[in-house]
Amino acid sequence: MSANPTILQSHNLKKYILETNVYPREAETLKELRNATASYPMGFMGTAPDAGQLMALLLKLLNAKKTLEVGVFTGYSLLLTALTIPNDGKIIAMDPDRKAYEMGLPFIKKAGVEHKIDFIESPALPGSNKESFDFAFVDADKDNYWNYHERLLKLVKIGGLIIYDNTLWGGSVVWAEEDVPAPKRKFRQAALAFNKAIADDSRVEISVVSIGDGFTICKRAH
Ligand SMILES: C[S@@+](CC[C@H](N)C(=O)[O-])C[C@H]1O[C@@H](n2cnc3c(N)ncnc32)[C@H](O)[C@@H]1O
Ligand SMILES: O=c1cc(-c2ccc(O)cc2)oc2c(O)c(O)ccc12
């Protein structure tokens, strides 16, 4: 897996998509946050901008107002969501790493969307089981995705969406185990198990999209 993971077959094709259709439409504050994150430790973990563009489109299609985010880091996906939902929308965002969130906070403030964010400095998941969210984005500890899924199916409304990031884990889901760098094997196994389980889950309609590091988009069916 490279420092800038892509599962598209061609780096040139990815560059073309970014330069032609993604960067020209990316909000200035998001661009600034992305650039600042690039020199932050583990900066490569930020959600890919092309995947973010798809997420914004889905948020708009859904008219999402109340959302949940598990795994904030410096806040690329958080700022993107805050810029996309209406002015009276709310995002509950959970991450034990307040320092990374605070690195991105000036960009959130500059964008004028801080009032939409309720940052919880804690590992997920929230205590409540009340179903009320239109949308959830999960981009945290990959070996916990199934636990998040079970919980989110109680928290997201019927018809709502859940997106899981990194479900193709740098494309390594189709590699031989011995070709995967040892530190990456645990989350590869987690992605393999998650992808198999979600395929069998009739509570959701799904699409696995080879964008960013792999997005699994789930619509709660019942
Ligand atoms: C890949 S980064 C998130 C990237 C973010 N979506 C973005 O666009 O910049 C993963 C984050 O998950 C957080 N994390 C790890 N375990 C977690 C947990 N149990 N609950 C919530 N967040 C967690 C880490 O602290 C890290 O900031
Ligand atoms: O290399 C990574 C690592 C993570 C990661 C590790 C441990 C956690 O508790 C959470 C996240 O996440 C990544 C990620 O989301 C990404 O898009 C690329 C690389 C990594």
Image: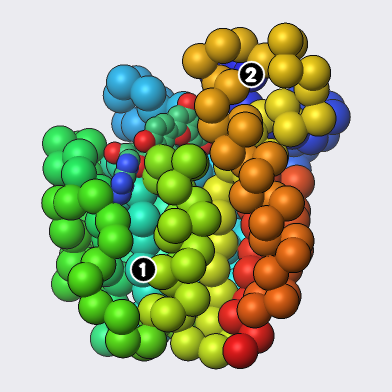
The residue labelled by disc 1 is: 68
Q: Residue at x 54, y 26 (%)?
A: 186
Quadrant of the picture in which ligand 2 is shown: top left
Q: Residue at x 55, y 89 (%)?
A: 158
Element at label 2? loop
> Which of these two is toward me, 107 or 166?
166
3D distance between C-alphas at marks 2 and 1: 28 Å
> Which of these two is toward me, 48 or 15?
48
Residue 123 image point, x, y percent: 24, 50
Residue 184: assigned label: none
Residue 200 image point, x, y percent: 74, 65
**What is the quadrant of residue 216 in the picture?**
bottom right
> Which of these two is toward me, 103 or 145?
145
Q: Does the residue labelled 1 lie within 8 Å of ligand 1?
A: no
Q: Does the residue labelled 2 lie within 8 Å of ligand 2?
A: yes
Above or below — where is 112 with respect to 101? Answer: below
**What is the quadrant of residue 13 in the picture?**
top right
Residue type at numbered disc 1: Leu
Q: Image check: 193 left or right of 147?
A: right
Residue type at numbered disc 2: Met
**What is the quadrant of residue 201 in the picture?**
bottom right
Residue 80 image point, x, y percent: 42, 59
> Which of these two is toward me, 196 or 164?
196
Q: Residue at x 81, y 30 (%)?
A: 174
Residue 1: assigned label: 2
Residues packed near mark 2 inside 10 Å, few (<14), some (14 to 19) or many (20 plus) = few
Residues packed near mark 1 inside 10 Å, few (<14), some (14 to 19) or many (20 plus) = many
Which quadrant does the C terminus fall into?
bottom right
Query: Which sits earlier in the primary sequence, circle 2 or circle 1?
Result: 2
